[in-house]
Image (spheres, rainbow, N blue to C red):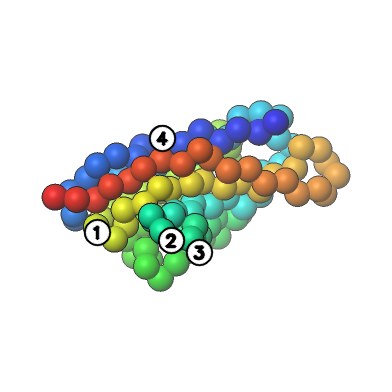
Amino acid sequence: QVQLVESGGGLVQPGGSLRLSCAASGSIFSMYAMGWYRQAPGKERDLIARITSGGTTDYADSVKDRFTISRDNAKNTVYLQMNSLKPEDTAVYYCNANFSYYNDGILNRSWGQGTQVTVSS
């Protein structure tokens, strides 16, 4: 079973920065796209950044030019560098990974446990 462990959340002032990490562990044959979602109180969980195994990235408009997603394929780890943080970025952030256990083309999906990011003065 694959587990995703997130770290790096916390409290930061507006305009500040945080870096989230998400490491996947377990028996993984191939890791495909990885992404970051966030969920604010009373709202749905939304995709904010995604990166393919080849490094192609995509961002939600709300975080474009402020957040950067990257990955280390050797470590099965995805990162989210968040700059110029705003109070509206406050949410629980979840990482997501798509992978296969074997060389069979079957796609599996796993989620991290979530990490709280609070932007407040």
* Place of residue 99 in the rendered image (x, y in percent of width and height, measured from the top left): 69, 44
In percent of width and height, residue 101 lies at: 76, 37
Measure how far apart labels 1 and 2 are at the Cα level: 17 Å
Q: Nearer the viewer, mark 4 or mark 3?
A: 4
* Marks 4,2: beta carbons within 8 A: no
> Which numbered disc, 3 or 2, marks the residue that appears first in the sequence?
2
Secondary element at tag 3: strand
Residue 16 visible in the current orientation = no
* Element type where label 4 sits in the image: strand
Residue at which label 2 appears: 43
Q: Amino acid at mark 1?
A: Lys
Residue at x 51%, y 33% (from the top left corner): 5
Write down the residue under mark 1: 86
Q: Name the residue beneath numbered marker 3.
A: 58
1 or 2: tag closer to the N-terminus: 2
Q: What whole-number distance in Å separates the C-alpha atoms at marks 4 and 3? A: 22 Å
- Counting residues from the N terminus, which is met first, the one under dot 4 or under dot 2? 4
Pinpoint residue 97: horizontal percent, then vertical percent: 61, 46
Instruction: State how far apart marks 1 and 3 are (Cα).
Output: 20 Å
- Identify the residue at image location x=51%, y=46%: 95
**Residue 7: which numbered mark, if any?**
4
Image: 2 above or below 118 = above
**Which amino acid lies under the numbered mark 3 shown in the image of this protein?**
Asp
